[in-house]
Image: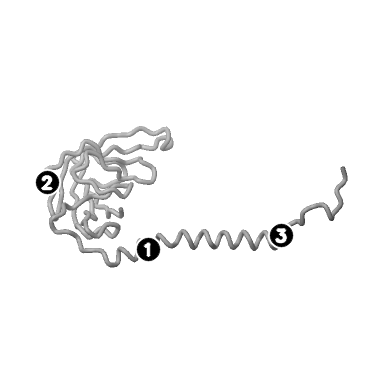
Amino acid sequence: MNASAADRPPRASRRGVRTATLLCTTAALAAAMIPVSAHSAGRATARPADPAAPVVVVDCSAQPQIRPEEYLLACGDGNNRLVGLHWDSWGTKTATATGVDMVNDCRPYCAAGRFRPYPVSVTLSNPQVWPENPGLQRYSTIRLVYTDTSPAPVAKDVTYKLVY
């Protein structure tokens, strides 16, 4: 059957399709921004850290932890994790523990590498208000002191800023 041009529905012009796509994308982006800006505005008026609340360490999933048994140091690839943590103290200024730093040697490449254990002393320090949860303080610095050898090329005593 042959349909004439009069029997077919009109075709959308490319310009019309582009305009519709642009409008939908703009509306979706605007809708996505509303919760973010509302959340940000709520943080500006949030209460200061509760002095009675314990200081936390924030993990890679942005979850507060107190005296964790494990702590992932390499959030991006999981190739460095503290395990078997035994906490000697957990205070308002510092927290100290001993454990093992399990580090992937990435030989010949990380997916084929082996995790090697390095005994370590851990000190968390420098508590600051946690911007994501202003009612809590979080440790912002971690110091690792390797009690035997350290993974090459890491020094035996290293300090890192915790960014989560």
Pick whichever, 28 or 140, lies toward us.
Answer: 28
Among numbered discs 1 and 3, the one appearing first in the sequence: 3
Which three-letter amino acid code belongs to the residue tagged 3? Arg
Tally of numbered tags: 3
Q: Is residue 116 left or right of residue 146?
A: right
Q: Is residue 148 visible?
A: no
The residue indicated by pointer 1 is 38
Q: CA distance from mark 1 to mark 2?
A: 38 Å
Which three-letter amino acid code belongs to the residue tagged 1? Ala
Q: What is the crowding at mark 3: few (fewer than 14 residues within 10 Å), some, or many (at least 20)?
A: few
Disc 2 secondary structure class: strand
- Measured as percent of width and height from the top left, residue 119 is found at 21, 37
- Measured as percent of width and height from the top left, residue 15 is found at 70, 63
- Measured as percent of width and height from the top left, residue 161 is found at 27, 55
Task: In the rendered structure, find residue 89 and report the number of the disc placed on it.
Answer: 2
The residue indicated by pointer 3 is 14
